[in-house]
């Protein structure tokens, strides 16, 4: 995810080694409200210095906030390509894809947040089995954050959509 924003691989690996995934993900989420001239540099400093949330963070995103993916369309395309590759590779049917779209809509409600992070929304739900469902994520730090921060919300959202309880397994799928 850091590399998708323009942070070099070496710097991204160092940050991932030194700082918890929650800090990194929170700073990525806040980047859109910081109006950065150089988003990668600002993001690195924000992570290193553990910057406080900017005004308006946690509220409805302002109209003038820039979506970080709009500033790096090539990386957005790569995320879309990853998603399509996973859907094809795991033969995810249209019904399962539609279920994930519904789950994405419910996750913020169950997580007590205003929105679903892009990295979770772009995940791929595999067809649920008996008693469990797997969700694929392209980054290891996203899998770890999903385990800690979103497991219950995703399970509750899946129960709402599927009308049955399932345990969720998040899986790193590069």
Image (cartoon, grey):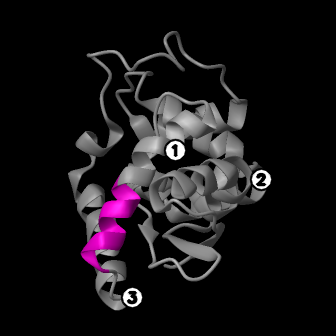
> Residue at the spot x=27%, y=48% of the render?
72
- Rounded to the nearest angstrom, the CA distance separating label 2 from label 3 is 34 Å
Q: Residues within 10 Å of mark 1 (few under 14, many from 20)?
A: many
Residue 94 lies in quadrant: bottom left
Tell me the tag on residue 90: 3
**Position in image of residue 168 (x %, y %):** 64, 67
**Position in image of residue 43 (x %, y %):** 52, 37
- Disc 2 vs disc 1: which is toward the camera? 1
Counting every numbered tag in the picture gives: 3
Magenta segment includes 92: no
> Residue at the spot x=28%, y=56% of the render?
76
Callout 1: helix, strand or loop? helix
Residue nearest the observer in this picture, 38 or 2: 2
Callout 2: helix, strand or loop? helix
> Residue at the spot x=63%, y=60% of the render?
141
Disc 2: which residue: 18
7 vs 143, left or right, is left
> Which residues fall within the magenta stretch?
93-101
14 vs 160, left or right, is right
Disc 1: which residue: 107
- Rounded to the nearest angstrom, the CA distance separating label 2 from label 1 is 29 Å
Magenta segment includes 95: yes
Q: Are marks 2 and 3 in contact (CB under 8 Å)?
A: no
């Amino acid at each position: 995810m850091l590399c998708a924003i323009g942070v070099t691989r070496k710097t991204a690996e160092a940050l991932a080694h030194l700082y918890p995934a929650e800090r990194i993900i929170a700073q990525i989420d806040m980047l859109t409200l910081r109006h950065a001239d150089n988003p990668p540099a600002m993001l690195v400093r924000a992570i290193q210095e553990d910057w406080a949330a900017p005004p308006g963070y946690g509220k409805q995103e302002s109209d003038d906030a820039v979506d970080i993916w709009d500033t790096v369309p090539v990386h957005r395309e790569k995320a879309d390509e990853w998603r399509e590759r996973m859907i094809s590779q795991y033969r995810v049917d249209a019904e399962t894809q539609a279920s994930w779209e519904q789950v994405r809509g419910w996750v913020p409600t169950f997580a007590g947040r205003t929105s679903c992070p892009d990295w979770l929304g772009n995940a791929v739900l595999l067809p649920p089995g008996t008693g469990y469902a797997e969700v694929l994520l392209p980054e290891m730090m996203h899998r770890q954050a999903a385990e800690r921060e979103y497991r219950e919300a995703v399970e509750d959202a899946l129960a709402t959509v599927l009308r049955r309880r399932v345990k969720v397994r998040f899986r790193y799928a590069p």
